[in-house]
Image (cartoon, grey):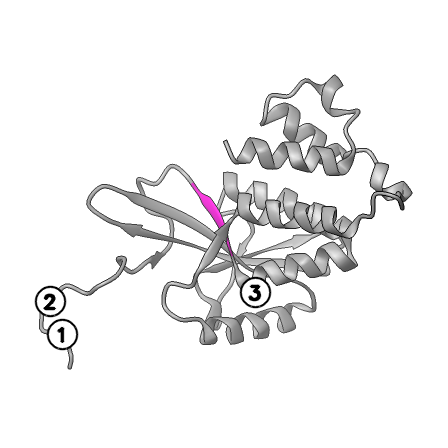
Amino acid sequence: MTPSKGTQRNGPPPRRTGRHPRAHHTEIRFTDAAIEDLFALQKKNRPALKWAMKKFLLIERNPEAGAPLGGGLHGYRKLTVGDRDWRIVWRVTFDETEHLIVDVGEIWAVGARKDSEVYDEMRRRVAALPEGPQTKTFEEVLTMLEASLTKKRRPAASSPTDDALAPTWLVDDLVNLAGYARSDVEVLTERQAMAAWVAYRSR
C-alpha cells in the first residue's frame, strides 16, 4: 500500500547527493565492493594503494576534488591514482535530521581499468545496491588492511619489504596531521607507521 501524504517512513532519512551548505566535516566511507578493490590493490599493486591512500586524505579535506561525471553517474566524481590507470570514483551525500548534519564521501570503485570499464562497473554496482548501502569508515578499512598484512607475514620468514621504512607521504602525514616528531617517524617501518596512522585516526 502506498503511504498517504504525511505518513512517516521507518528507517533513517534518505540521503541526497551533494554537499550540505552547512556541513563542515567529511567522513569517507567504503562500500564492500570498494574494500575488495583495495585488497586487490594491496595484493597486486602496493604503490597504487599508497597513492590511493593519499587521494583519500585529499577527498577527506576536499570532497569536491577531482572531476564530475555525467550520464548515468551524475553526482559522482573521479580522481586518477598513481600511473593514471587507476581511478577512484565517489559521491558526496548528506542527510539532515533534527540535530545532525552528515556529510559523507563514499568511495565506490578503485580499479586498473580504462575509464569506460570503470564507469560501466560503477553503473552495475549502483544498480545492484539497496537503498542506504552498508559502508565502513576509513579507520575500519585501514585496520582491516593492516591486519591483512600482519596475517600474511611469518615471524621466521622476514623479507626486505617487512623492514622497509615508511614512505615519505606517510611520514609527512604523521608529522603534519598527527603531530608526531619527524625524527621518531622516520625510523618506523611501513607497517609500524601504518599502525600509528590507524591509532591516530581512531582517537
Q: Amino acid at mark 1?
A: Pro
Q: Is residue 54 above or below residue 189?
A: below
The kind of secondary structure element at disc 3 is helix
Q: CA distance from mark 1 to mark 2?
A: 6 Å
Residue 146 position in % (x across, y down) = 67, 45
* Disc 1 to disc 2: CB gap under 8 Å: yes
Q: Is residue 13 magenta?
A: no
Residue sitting nearer the eye, 73 or 151: 151
Q: Amino acid at mark 2?
A: Thr
Q: Is residue 177 above or below residue 116?
A: above
Q: Is residue 6 above or below residue 194?
A: below
Q: In this rendering, would 110 be left or right of 85? A: left
Q: In this rendering, would 203 be left or right of 195? A: left
The residue pinned by badge 1 equals: 3
Q: CA distance from mark 3 to mark 2?
A: 34 Å
Whether residue 40 can be seen here: yes
Res 119 → quadrant = bottom right
| Quadrant (top left, top right, bottom left, bottom right) of the N terminus | bottom left
Q: Earlier in the sequence, mark 3 or mark 2?
A: 2
Residue drawn at x 38%, y 46% as measured from the top left:
103
Residues in magenta, as a range: 26-30
The residue pinned by badge 3 equals: 33
